[in-house]
Amino acid sequence: MNETLLLVGAYLLGSVPTGLLLAKSMGVDIREAGSGNIGATNVYRTIGRKLGILTLLGDCLKGLIPVLVARWLGLPDLWVAAAGLCAFLGHVYTIFLGFKGGKGVATALGVFLGTSPLSVLFGIVIFGSVLYKWRYVSLASITAAALIPVLVWATGGSVKLVVMAVVIACIVIFKHRENIARLTAGTENKFKA
């Protein structure tokens, strides 16, 4: 029973559209601004640094909290991974927006902070290096997502956590398919601090 409630709660928490709510507080429907995405990068670009950072933190917490609750309950890695995956899926396919959500990078970050913090450290170095070199948030996100399952495995993550990381990585990359097309065409927007 606890496990079922945890998974439902994780999905519903993940479904809270942080960026949309913060943007609406400024009178902006983020779905109709910039790229139309509800995530931190679009909020940052269209509304400003403060709300962009708050969106990042909010989305990250959506992934971290269910994992920490699962750990606090003493559940095995299978349920910890399931809680993290449900929170991530809630963000990407939110029930509150007709199952259309963000790309999941910040929420995945929260999940991995709670399940494999050492892999996050390496992932942030990779993300930062790619962003510094090429100035594309999407390319940095895709690269970090592609490598996170390897990092989780290399830092001692269980098979369940590695499988969760593979599923999350595949969805993150899939959600970036339009960015991949723009990167290939040379029309992707570069990040400006």
Image: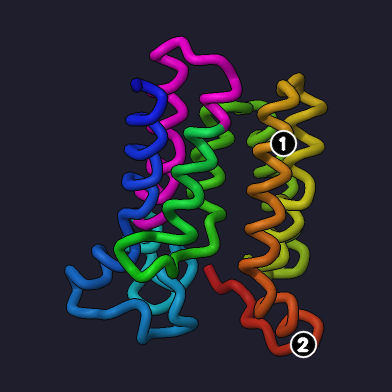
Location of residue 71 with respect to 146 vertically, above or below: above
Relative to residue 26, is residue 71 drawn left or right?
right
Q: Residue at x 72, y 36 (%)?
A: 163
Regarding residue 131, the answer to whether it shows in the image is no
Main secondary-structure element of the magenta-colored stretch? helix
Residue type at mark 1? Answer: Val
Query: Does 68 lie within the magenta span?
Result: yes
What residue sits right under mark 1 in the picture? Answer: 163
Q: Residue at x 69, y 74 (%)?
A: 177
Please tell me the numbered disc located at residue 48: none
Q: How is the image coloured?
A: rainbow
Q: Quadrant of residue 162?
A: top right
Question: Residue most toward the front?
Answer: 1
Secondary structure under tag 1 reads: helix
Query: Does 115 lie within the magenta span?
Result: no
What residue sits right under mark 2 in the picture? Answer: 186
Relative to residue 123, is residue 59 drawn left or right?
left
Residue at mark 1 to residue at mark 2: CA–CA distance? 33 Å
Number of other residues with Cα within 10 Å of mark 2, as a class: few under 14, some 14 to 19, many 20 or more: few
| Magenta stretch bounds | 55-81
Residue type at mark 2? Answer: Gly
